[in-house]
Image: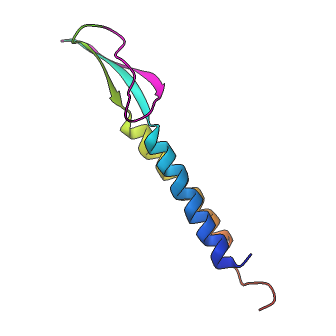
Amino acid sequence: MRLESKRKLIVLIGLLVIAAMCAFPPWVYTVKTVTVYSQTPAGYHFIGSPPAAAGTTLMHGVRLDGVRLGFQCLGVVALAAFGWLVTGGREEGS
């Protein structure tokens, strides 16, 4: 396999992993009162159908965990960049 095709494969895999992570992002349950704000992980759910709130009052909610999703995407980008650099040597037989 040529180096350019290896690099293209690394980029493609990285993009597919990021797309999958964005399709099934992490969520958090939230509780907000006058004096308390609490968050509890709610797991990973499809972006089109977030989990139901843990409670039935307006104090309870659910939201996307953007910070965790951002760090996950950053990790995939770092791994893909590392793979890109590792495969950047000269082709054998050149």
Q: How many marks?
A: 0
Spot occupied by residue 42 in the image (x, y as percentages of width and height): 44, 22
Q: Residue furthest bottom?
A: 94
17 over 10 or under it: above or below: above
Residue 68 lies in magenta, yes or no?
A: no
Left or right of 46: which side holds 92? right
Q: Residue 1: where, in percent of width, then height?
A: 74, 75
For the question of whether residue 4 can be seen, the reply is yes
Q: Residue furthest left?
A: 34
For this view, does 1 lie left or right of residue 65? Answer: right
Report the span colored magenta.
34-55
Is 7 or 49 nearer to us in this picture? 49
Which one is nearer the viewer's eye here, 50 or 87? Answer: 50
> Is 28 placed left or right of 9 in the picture?
left
Residue that appears at 37% across and 12% down: 54
Q: How is the image coloured?
A: rainbow
In the image, residue 16 above or below residue 91: above
Q: Position of residue 27 (x, y in %)?
A: 41, 29
Q: Residue at x 42, y 45 (%)?
A: 70
Q: Position of residue 94 (x, y in %)?
A: 77, 92
Q: Quadrant of residue 25?
A: top left
The answer to whether residue 88 is visible is no
| Main secondary structure found in the magenta portion | loop
Instruction: Tell me if residue 47 comes above or below residue 7 in the rendering.
Output: above
In the figure, is residue 88 to the left or right of 38? right
Say whether residue 38 is magenta. Answer: yes
